[in-house]
Image (cartoon, rainbow, N blue to C red):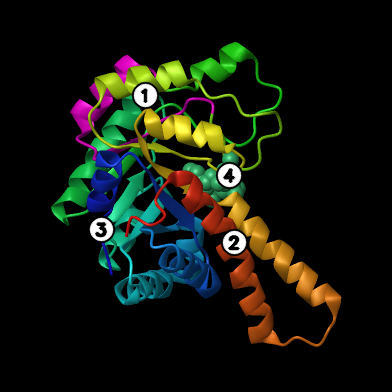
Amino acid sequence: MLASTQELLQTARQNIYAIGAFNIYNLEGVKAVVSAAETHRSAAMLQIHPSALKYGRSALVAMCLEAARAATVPISVHLDHSTNANDIRQALTAGMNSIMADGSHLPYAENMVFTREMTRLAHKSGAIVEAEIGRISGTEDGLTIAEKEAKMTDPAQAVEFVRTTQVDALAVTIGNVHGEYKNPPRLDFDRLARIRRLIDIPLVLHGASGLPGWMISRSIQLGVCKFNVNTEIRQAYMRSLKQEVCAGNGSDLLDIAGVAIAAMQEAIAEKLHLFGSVGKA
Ligand code: G3H
Ligand code: 13P
Ligand code: ZN
Ligand code: NA
């Protein structure tokens, strides 16, 4: 069934587990998320990045909403990392009610103004908003410790940011990075604990691909109730396509799509277990 992100995150938070938000780009991705969630009796989120929105337009949103409605477990549909009002408007018009307004590339004061405006816009349509302070970037080799620290979420700023912008969920930067971790991941759990003590809205951790299970569990204990997963699912898809096509064993389009869906499903199921959401829906 189509669920609201707010409901999913609140239930997860009360019961100390987390919701997996999986980036999808096409029908195979949608099917993989919904099937994995159904098989494991777990809620999940279908997450559309603006690059995917550009590629699929409202057809992709419609596909996600339809799949969520038909699902036997709660699924919500969310716009990821949106940096401008146009993408947000398009998503709202297409029927999404959960968005990320991402002003994290802006200086702090501008991020606050941007996020406050986007939150007003989204709230008018009854949508809920996730925002980010600190800056989650791609894998950061070559940065000094001081440079890395400067990108992390400042707990005191986070309090002011949440109060001023009225966002519904906050993505934190505590050493998490998008894509693969080139060095072993190091998360600042003390910082996460301080943020949790000061802020009462759901906390989100991006860049979950590549995090070991114990870091995921520890983050959940310290209040994270949504994890974003993109890279590992894309990689499972691409690897499977390459293998099937290169094997040259005569498989046809739908056979290959089926194998790719199964490969993504396996990667998604692994995350659902780590997030503790299995058997809760
Ligand atoms: O935030 C998600 C973006 O789609 C980046 O994804 O880390 O797989 O490049 P990526
Ligand atoms: P990964 O690509 O590291 O899984 O991060 C996903 C993400 O944060 C999407 O917003
Ligand atoms: Zn992200
Ligand atoms: Na990552």
Residue 167 sits in quarter: top left
Which is more toward the observer, 279 or 194?
Answer: 279
Asked whether mark 4 and ligand 2 are closer than 8 Å, the reply comes as yes
Q: Position of residue 227 (x, y in %)?
A: 44, 44
Q: Position of residue 259 (x, y in %)?
A: 66, 75
Q: Is residue 171 magenta?
A: yes
Say above or below: 84 vs 59.
above
Residue depicted at x 54% and y 26%: 175
Q: Say which label, 2 or 3, has the lower sequence index.
A: 3
Q: Are marks 3 and 1 in contact (CB under 8 Å)?
A: no
Q: Which mark is residue 97?
A: 3
Q: Say which label, 3 or 1, has the lower sequence index.
A: 3
Say above or below: 46 vs 20.
below
Callout 4 amino acid: Ser
Marks 1 and 4, how far apart at CA: 27 Å
Callout 1 amino acid: Tyr
Callout 3 amino acid: Asn
Judge depth for marks 2 and 1 and give the one in front.
2
Q: Which residue is mark 1?
A: 108
Q: Say which label, 3 or 4, has the lower sequence index.
A: 3
Asked whether mark 2 and ligand 2 are closer than 8 Å, the reply comes as no
Instruction: Name the element at disc 4.
Output: loop
Residue 51 in sight here = yes
Can you say which quadrant of the picture contains the N terminus? Answer: bottom left
Residue depicted at x 48% and y 25%: 174
Q: Which residue is mark 4?
A: 209
Marks 3 and 1, how far apart at CA: 26 Å
